[in-house]
Image: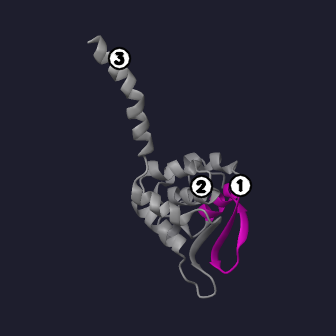
Amino acid sequence: MKKLLIYLLLLLPFATFAQEGETVRKEVKLLVKQMGGKGIVYGKFVGFAGTTPTEFKAFQQFVKIADKEEIIFYLDDKDPTLRAYSFWALAVKFPTEAAKYYKELGADDAVIQTMMGGCIISPDKVGSFRSSILKSPMVNLFKEKSILKLPGSDF
Protein backbone atom coordinates (compact mmCIF):
# COMPACT_ATOMS: atom_id res chain seq x y z
CA MET A 1 0.00 0.00 0.00
CA LYS A 2 2.82 2.38 0.88
CA LYS A 3 4.55 1.68 -2.45
CA LEU A 4 1.34 2.37 -4.34
CA LEU A 5 0.98 5.74 -2.63
CA ILE A 6 4.57 6.64 -3.50
CA TYR A 7 4.04 5.70 -7.16
CA LEU A 8 0.86 7.76 -7.33
CA LEU A 9 2.55 10.78 -5.80
CA LEU A 10 5.44 10.48 -8.26
CA LEU A 11 3.23 10.03 -11.33
CA LEU A 12 0.59 12.64 -10.52
CA PRO A 13 2.68 15.67 -11.60
CA PHE A 14 3.40 14.04 -14.98
CA ALA A 15 -0.27 13.25 -15.56
CA THR A 16 -1.21 16.85 -14.70
CA PHE A 17 1.44 18.24 -17.04
CA ALA A 18 0.19 16.09 -19.91
CA GLN A 19 -3.36 17.40 -19.44
CA GLU A 20 -2.26 21.06 -19.44
CA GLY A 21 -0.38 20.60 -22.71
CA GLU A 22 -3.52 19.24 -24.33
CA THR A 23 -5.89 22.12 -23.47
CA VAL A 24 -6.05 23.28 -27.07
CA ARG A 25 -7.09 20.89 -29.82
CA LYS A 26 -4.97 20.45 -32.95
CA GLU A 27 -7.54 21.94 -35.30
CA VAL A 28 -7.78 25.06 -33.13
CA LYS A 29 -3.98 25.39 -33.06
CA LEU A 30 -3.92 25.27 -36.87
CA LEU A 31 -6.46 28.10 -37.09
CA VAL A 32 -4.54 30.15 -34.52
CA LYS A 33 -1.38 29.71 -36.57
CA GLN A 34 -3.19 31.16 -39.61
CA MET A 35 -4.59 34.11 -37.61
CA GLY A 36 -1.49 35.22 -35.73
CA GLY A 37 2.09 36.18 -36.34
CA LYS A 38 1.47 38.96 -38.83
CA GLY A 39 0.66 41.76 -36.40
CA ILE A 40 -2.55 42.71 -38.22
CA VAL A 41 -6.13 42.04 -37.13
CA TYR A 42 -8.29 41.84 -40.24
CA GLY A 43 -11.97 42.52 -40.70
CA LYS A 44 -14.22 40.67 -43.12
CA PHE A 45 -13.83 42.85 -46.23
CA VAL A 46 -10.42 44.42 -46.86
CA GLY A 47 -8.36 45.77 -49.71
CA PHE A 48 -9.51 47.56 -52.82
CA ALA A 49 -11.65 44.61 -53.91
CA GLY A 50 -13.18 44.02 -50.46
CA THR A 51 -12.04 40.43 -50.28
CA THR A 52 -12.10 38.31 -47.14
CA PRO A 53 -8.54 37.59 -45.99
CA THR A 54 -7.37 34.11 -45.00
CA GLU A 55 -6.77 35.34 -41.46
CA PHE A 56 -10.39 36.41 -41.08
CA LYS A 57 -11.65 33.10 -42.51
CA ALA A 58 -9.49 31.31 -39.93
CA PHE A 59 -10.93 33.61 -37.26
CA GLN A 60 -14.48 32.72 -38.32
CA GLN A 61 -13.66 29.02 -37.99
CA PHE A 62 -11.98 29.70 -34.63
CA VAL A 63 -15.20 31.29 -33.39
CA LYS A 64 -17.21 28.31 -34.60
CA ILE A 65 -15.11 25.46 -33.21
CA ALA A 66 -13.13 26.78 -30.24
CA ASP A 67 -14.62 26.26 -26.81
CA LYS A 68 -14.53 28.81 -24.01
CA GLU A 69 -11.34 27.44 -22.43
CA GLU A 70 -9.48 27.45 -25.75
CA ILE A 71 -10.45 31.04 -26.46
CA ILE A 72 -9.49 32.17 -22.95
CA PHE A 73 -6.18 30.32 -23.28
CA TYR A 74 -5.14 32.68 -26.11
CA LEU A 75 -6.04 35.84 -24.16
CA ASP A 76 -2.63 35.40 -22.49
CA ASP A 77 -0.67 34.60 -25.65
CA LYS A 78 2.59 36.43 -26.31
CA ASP A 79 1.27 37.51 -29.74
CA PRO A 80 -0.87 40.64 -29.27
CA THR A 81 -2.73 39.85 -32.49
CA LEU A 82 -3.94 36.57 -30.99
CA ARG A 83 -4.93 38.31 -27.77
CA ALA A 84 -7.06 40.72 -29.82
CA TYR A 85 -8.64 37.98 -31.95
CA SER A 86 -9.30 35.92 -28.81
CA PHE A 87 -11.12 38.72 -27.07
CA TRP A 88 -13.14 39.35 -30.22
CA ALA A 89 -14.08 35.65 -30.33
CA LEU A 90 -14.98 35.72 -26.65
CA ALA A 91 -17.21 38.77 -27.18
CA VAL A 92 -19.00 37.03 -30.03
CA LYS A 93 -19.39 33.59 -28.52
CA PHE A 94 -19.37 34.15 -24.74
CA PRO A 95 -20.32 37.78 -24.05
CA THR A 96 -20.61 37.36 -20.28
CA GLU A 97 -17.09 35.92 -20.18
CA ALA A 98 -15.88 38.83 -22.29
CA ALA A 99 -17.25 41.18 -19.65
CA LYS A 100 -15.07 39.47 -17.03
CA TYR A 101 -11.92 40.01 -19.11
CA TYR A 102 -12.84 43.48 -20.38
CA LYS A 103 -11.02 45.49 -17.72
CA GLU A 104 -8.10 43.07 -17.50
CA LEU A 105 -7.35 43.56 -21.19
CA GLY A 106 -7.73 47.31 -20.84
CA ALA A 107 -4.21 47.47 -19.43
CA ASP A 108 -2.76 45.70 -22.49
CA ASP A 109 -0.85 48.43 -24.31
CA ALA A 110 0.78 46.21 -26.94
CA VAL A 111 0.41 47.79 -30.38
CA ILE A 112 -1.31 45.94 -33.20
CA GLN A 113 -2.40 47.00 -36.67
CA THR A 114 -6.05 46.77 -37.68
CA MET A 115 -7.54 46.58 -41.14
CA MET A 116 -11.27 46.42 -40.63
CA GLY A 117 -12.52 47.54 -44.01
CA GLY A 118 -11.07 48.97 -47.15
CA CYS A 119 -7.32 49.35 -47.43
CA ILE A 120 -6.39 51.52 -44.45
CA ILE A 121 -4.21 49.95 -41.80
CA SER A 122 -4.46 51.69 -38.45
CA PRO A 123 -2.33 51.26 -35.33
CA ASP A 124 -4.22 50.35 -32.18
CA LYS A 125 -3.52 48.96 -28.73
CA VAL A 126 -4.98 45.61 -27.72
CA GLY A 127 -6.68 47.28 -24.74
CA SER A 128 -8.45 49.89 -26.85
CA PHE A 129 -9.20 47.36 -29.58
CA ARG A 130 -11.41 45.40 -27.19
CA SER A 131 -13.46 48.50 -26.55
CA SER A 132 -13.78 49.40 -30.21
CA ILE A 133 -14.72 45.83 -31.17
CA LEU A 134 -17.52 45.78 -28.61
CA LYS A 135 -18.94 48.99 -30.03
CA SER A 136 -18.49 47.81 -33.59
CA PRO A 137 -20.98 46.07 -35.84
CA MET A 138 -18.14 43.56 -36.46
CA VAL A 139 -19.43 41.57 -33.47
CA ASN A 140 -22.78 41.32 -35.19
CA LEU A 141 -21.24 39.62 -38.23
CA PHE A 142 -21.72 36.43 -36.26
CA LYS A 143 -25.04 36.92 -34.52
CA GLU A 144 -27.90 39.37 -34.23
CA LYS A 145 -27.84 40.10 -30.50
CA SER A 146 -25.79 43.18 -29.66
CA ILE A 147 -23.45 43.02 -26.68
CA LEU A 148 -23.03 46.74 -26.24
CA LYS A 149 -24.42 46.63 -22.71
CA LEU A 150 -22.06 44.08 -21.21
CA PRO A 151 -22.12 43.90 -17.43
CA GLY A 152 -18.86 45.35 -16.15
CA SER A 153 -18.20 47.42 -19.26
CA ASP A 154 -17.51 51.12 -19.00
CA PHE A 155 -19.82 52.45 -21.72
Task: Give me the C-alpha separation between circle 1 and circle 3.
Answer: 46 Å
Label 1 or label 3, whichever lies nearer to me, is 3
- Residue 66 is drawn in which quadrant? bottom left
Task: Give me the C-alpha separation between circle 2 and circle 1.
Answer: 10 Å
Is 11 part of what is drawn in magenta? no
Q: Is residue 65 above or below residue 1?
A: below
Amino acid type, residue under disc 1 in the picture: Ala
Task: Give me the C-alpha separation between circle 3 and circle 2.
Answer: 41 Å
The residues colored magenta run 111-135
Tell me the residue at 51%/69% (across/down).
140
Q: Nearer the viewer, residue 29 or 6?
A: 6
Residue 36 visible at all: yes
Task: Compare marks 2 and 1 and give the one earlier in the sequence.
Answer: 2
Marks counted in the figure total: 3
Q: Quick check: marks 2 and 1 in contact, CB under 8 Å? A: yes
Amino acid type, residue under disc 3 in the picture: Ile
Tell me the residue at 46%/51% (across/down).
70
Q: Which residue is mark 3?
A: 6
Task: Judge the density around disc 1: few (<14), some (14-19), many (≥20) Cα neighbours within 10 Å.
Answer: some
In which quadrant will I find the N terminus? top left
Q: Which residue is mark 1?
A: 110
Q: Which residue is mark 2?
A: 83
Percent position of residue 43, x then y:
58, 72
- Residue 84 is drawn in which quadrant? bottom right
Q: Is residue 40 above or below residue 76?
A: below
Percent position of residue 149, x then y:
57, 56
Is 126 part of what is drawn in magenta? yes
